Image (spheres, rainbow, N blue to C red):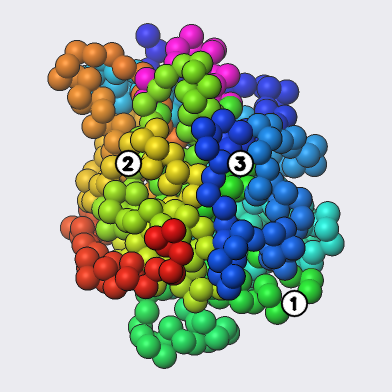
Amino acid sequence: MADTIKFLLNESDMPKFWYNIAADLPEPPPPVLHPGTGQPITPDDLAPLFPMAVIQQEVSQEREIEIPQPVRDVLQQWRPSPLHRARRLEQALDTPARIYYKYEGVSPAGSHKPNTAIAQAFYNKEQGVKRITTETGAGQWGSALALAGSFFGLEIEVYMVRVSYDQKPYRRAFMETFGATCIASPSNRTESGRAILEKDPDSTGSLGIAISEAVEMAAQREDTKYSLGSVLNHVLLHQTIIGQEALRQFEMADDYPDMVIGCTGGGSNFAGIAFPFIGRKLRGEQDVDVVAVEPANCPTLTKGAYAYDFGDTAHLTPLVKMHTLGSTFVPPGFHAGGLRYHGMAPLVSQLSDMGVIKPRAYAQAACFEAGVTFAKAEGIIPAPEANHAVRAAIDEALVCKESGQGKAILFNLCGHGHFDMQAYTDYFAGKLFDQDYDPSEVAMALAGLPSVASG
């Protein structure tokens, strides 16, 4: 058999609809609550932040939502993305497992993030919005929205978590190339940023802090909306184009995964690859094991509480029920910046609470070891975030080696690591340590959950 097998779809095979898993859940998702009243929010409550088309998708119960043609026209620049059979990795591991990976690093931004950035930019442009504010962790989301803003003529302002801002200067350069403004967070531009800096002038920042700054800035101008790259239902919806393509590609391969794996920070790339397969499972069509892999030093699914919490540190956002470490928790400054979020997507959290998905956590050194093994075999250097999924896939393949069981394993290689080479430099120099979070900080953050948390 050939060393490399790649399953490619034609442009005409790209899905025309996004898949909404809410339609297949046995119970509707818990409502999003207004932080002031504790009552379910209305579309009007969200209108200052999001265009109405996005709000309607956020609360939709329809199984399929049509992808607008202008969005499909842009996505066809790199979609459908390839599905690879990792034959060289299988040989290197001497495993009977069949390892597949969906490769999202083929996008112009090098990750899965443009799948929703293009859609959100389109809907904002349609509503007459001129400017979008957002946050970014490692920079993948900021890069994607900068790209989308350039395509649709929108001004983009990105608040980038300080530790990643310092670690990844080429991500900043990417955003600036497409005309976006990139600001280190916490910053002196906002009240929420200044409050953090007053308490801790050397704060490494967090996604929760950066979200507060972006939301605060969006609320100040009529021509400005806020955009989020993960967590919310509409973002996960837009990413399901990944798993839908994978379903078609597995038909080409005459195979079907026994296990689907994705790394999880806010939940978007995981949902993108897994939700279409989980939907088939929920409808009783075909079973599959699903594994959500998170960093051990920001373990929302494995260690967090399933409760109502704020999505940001300054408590400017609505309350959502999710697995959370507490909105004031600031994770250690590890290299997988896209996974440094205190909460998990409500839909992913609900599936975990139902037992439909199985979460696990890995320390970063073991993940980079797996990433190097994968790169040497397959020729692609994964992003630090993607290394978590690679680690789990390799571990499962080694279990198959011990048992002699030839399972089919699918994981989402959600982005390449070309902008993250400092992380690999640190790994090879022995400077990349497994930084533990402080359990007392989590306990303090969880103690501050809003009063509806027990409801």
What numbered label is drawn on residue 381? none
What numbered label is drawn on residue 221? 1
Q: Give the secondary structure at mark 1.
A: loop
Q: Amino acid at mark 1?
A: Arg
**142 relative to 248, above or below:** below
Q: CA distance from mark 1 to mark 3?
A: 28 Å
Q: Give the secondary structure at mark 2.
A: strand
Viewer-nearest residue: 440 or 151: 440
Q: CA distance from mark 2 to mark 3?
A: 21 Å
Q: Amino acid at mark 2?
A: Pro
Give coordinates of residue 355: x percent, y percent: 36, 35
What numbered label is drawn on residue 237? 3
Q: Can you identify the residue that label 2 sits on?
A: 359
Viewer-nearest residue: 349 or 150: 349
Q: Quadrant of the N terminus?
A: top left
x 51%, y 73%: residue = 315
x 61%, y 59%: residue = 40
Which circle's residue, 2 or 3, is located before the other in the chain?
Answer: 3
